[in-house]
Amino acid sequence: MVQAKTNAMRILDKKKISYNVIVYDSHDGKIDGMSVAHKIGKDLQCVYKTLVAQGSSGSIYVFVIPVQSELDLKKAAKVTGEKNVALVPMKDIQKLTGYIRGGCSPIGMVKPYPTFIDSSASQLDEIVVSGGKIGVLIELSVEDLQSVTEAVLQEVVK
């Protein structure tokens, strides 16, 4: 089955960044990060989810964290320089990112938001993130993900 290119893949191709596409079956409705990591047989430490948050200033931020972890809102506020940070309501994700829940890639959002990858990624050679569509993941080097998203490595999980 030929996988149609997602916006995230087109951006990586344009920048000549190598990546692997991992496709999984999402028909059972289990699209949370932990279930997906088990489906693709990858270590939970390598699979990251993309969270979108808003600071008290109204600015939007993207956090890429391990699927089994929880975003620490105090640490998130500190690294963004905000008084506080809250996750964006699910209903607003598509409007802000161009992606739907379960298919939100840190690559190729409608605007280039400040992006933070949890510092745990510095221990990895490869990281797995959403490919921009439910059922599609992208595996690439942490350095390449940082480069394409202009992300900063920071400790942002509990």
Image: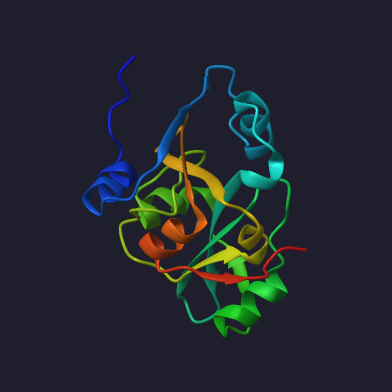
Q: Residue 78: image x %, image y %?
A: 64, 82
Q: Is residue 47 left or right of residue 62?
A: right
Residue extending furthest top?
1
Q: Quarter holding the N terminus? A: top left
Residue extending furthest right?
158
Question: In terms of image quadrants, where is residue 144?
Answer: bottom left
Which residue appears at 39% of the width and 45% of the height? 99
Viewer-closest of 140 and 102: 140
Question: In terms of image quadrants, where is residue 121?
Answer: bottom right
Q: Residue 117: image x %, image y %?
A: 56, 63
Q: Is residue 61 left or right of residue 36?
A: left
Residue extending furthest left?
14
Which residue appears at 61% of the width and 67% of the height? 86
Compared to residue 56, the image places residue 65 above or below, namely above
Q: Quarter holding the C terminus? A: bottom right
Compared to residue 140, the image places residue 119 above or below, namely below
Is residue 84 among what the camera can see?
no
Q: Residue 18: image x %, image y %?
A: 36, 45
Q: Residue 102: image x %, image y %?
A: 52, 38
Which residue appears at 73% of the width and 52% of the height? 69
The colour scheme applied to this rendered structure is: rainbow
The total number of labels drawn is 0
Is residue 89 among what the camera can see?
yes
Which residue appears at 59% of the width and 17% of the height? 28
Compared to residue 27, the image places residue 69 above or below, namely below
